Image (cartoon, rainbow, N blue to C red):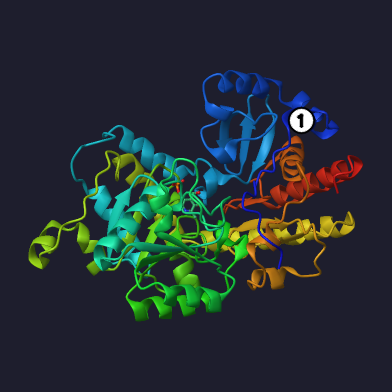
Amino acid sequence: MATLSSSTDPTQTKDATELTSSPLVQAYIRRTPKSAAFAERARRMLPSGVTHDVRYIEPHGIYITHAQGTRKWDVDGNEYVDYIGGHGALLLGHCHPEMVAAVETQLHKGTHYGACHELELQWAELLLDMVPSAERVRFTNSGTEATLLGIRLARAFTGRKKILRFIGHFHGWQDHVAFNAFSLFDGAPTAGVLPEIADNVVIAPPWDWEETQRIIEEHDDIAAVLIEPTGSTWGQVPVKPEFLHSLREATAQRGIVLMFDEVVTGFRCASGGAQEALGVTPDLTALGKIVAGAMHGAALVGRADIMNRLDHRAAAAGGFEKVGHQGTYNAMPTTCAAAIATLQIVKTTDACQRAIDYGRGLQDALDDVFRDEGVNWIAYGKYGGFHVFLNPNNISTTREEIESGKFDYATLCAPAGPGVMTKIRIGCLLHGVDIMPWPGGPISAVHTDEDCHLTAEAFRQTIRMLKDEGDI
Ligand SMILES: Cc1ncc(COP(=O)(O)O)c(C=O)c1O
């Protein structure tokens, strides 16, 4: 197994001036002059010129004017096949007509009542119906808030302090989960997070059950275990299904709350999320992105006895202090409208399966390109997305082996050389495809054969340019 750098930067950003001397980057700069001007204006106001770290890219990102289906267009008039997919929220693609109609109708009826309304009940009923572990629901604004609320409830319910998390697993940007995701894999707190918070977070390797079991046994004060059930970055580093079953058993035996982070996998692996696809039922589940129909919303669902820590009547009857939870924009009517329209489609159609099938076809097309072009990269990803293993240490393996959970984070996320990931991303943009930086991306149910062809060709041209520049 490879060793893990304590500060692996997934974007592997090279010095901006060094990058701009690359012909590939030069061609991108020539293609995107208006985006460059917007980026210059942005840097004067927004740190890094962006509003989300993942959107940071040197020398500049693209500025989008509009989107439809699987495509989006930038201010320079360039068209892109989109694999950012609203950071995974757009299972149905951009501007799905039923989602748009539902939000439009609701906009005219009011965006915020400051009171209860029926749409939040319809949304909750869908979650109870679709997600195996959902007995109660509390809506939040973001996945980050859902994991934060889950941690608070688990501590209140168990009376214990510690949280156990897994190397590389991402659960949002709140303090308890803000380290050991993209960097600081040794569990040291990131800048601005109190050491006392990190002291109460235990880190375990999700590819090693014996070590994880040892860590669980070593601590008698673990309130919750938090995991991305298909592996970090929803399967970039897959978790063995047996690992999840063992974890379920060990946490149940010790009264530890098992929380699945299904912010991405919920309604992507299956209409009931990874828990349905893998047959493991957690105690709590954080849902985000697709759950809110690609609007700003999320949810925590789970066991009634744990969720009832939020319930006034249960607290009075049970003699415990109710856990507080507010949120001005929780379950806004417009978000509920988008969520209901989207989840109805997920529930009643083969949307999840279509995205999964397209993913397989795309991975085959990419692997053909990698073989033709003589690179040892491997495309994989079981659940409505794709990842590319850049294989810098030239390991002899297969897609099936990777998906079986055989490899650790350091192996699958090994840096492929300075600036290479950034150049792959820019190369794809140059050829009309927008991907996530690792490289990979979520897939929608509406991606087409033409999208697949364009994507494979974008990778082919990018590989050729990287070879010409001596990067690979
Ligand atoms: C697995 C996972 N959990 C939690 C979050 C945080 O969700 P949000 O960005 O809505 O706060 C994300 C966001 O990308 C995620 O991928």
Q: Is residue 446 left or right of residue 229?
A: right
Q: Is residue 244 visible?
A: no
User: Residue 169, image x and y in percent?
Assistant: 53, 58
Q: Is residue 247 above or below residue 83?
A: below
| Nearer to the camera, 164 or 38 | 164
Q: Is residue 298 above or below residue 95?
A: below
Q: Is residue 31 left or right of residue 54?
A: right
User: Residue 176, image x and y in percent?
Assistant: 41, 52
The secondary structure type at the circle numbered 1 is helix
Give the residue at mark 1: 28
User: Residue 444, image x and y in percent?
Assistant: 57, 52
Quarter where residue 467 is shown: top right
Q: Is residue 385 left or right of residue 51?
A: right
Q: Is residue 2 above or below residue 51?
A: below
* Amino acid marked by disc 1: Tyr
* Residue depicted at 71% across the width and 68% down the height: 1
* Residue depicted at 21% across the width and 46% down the height: 117
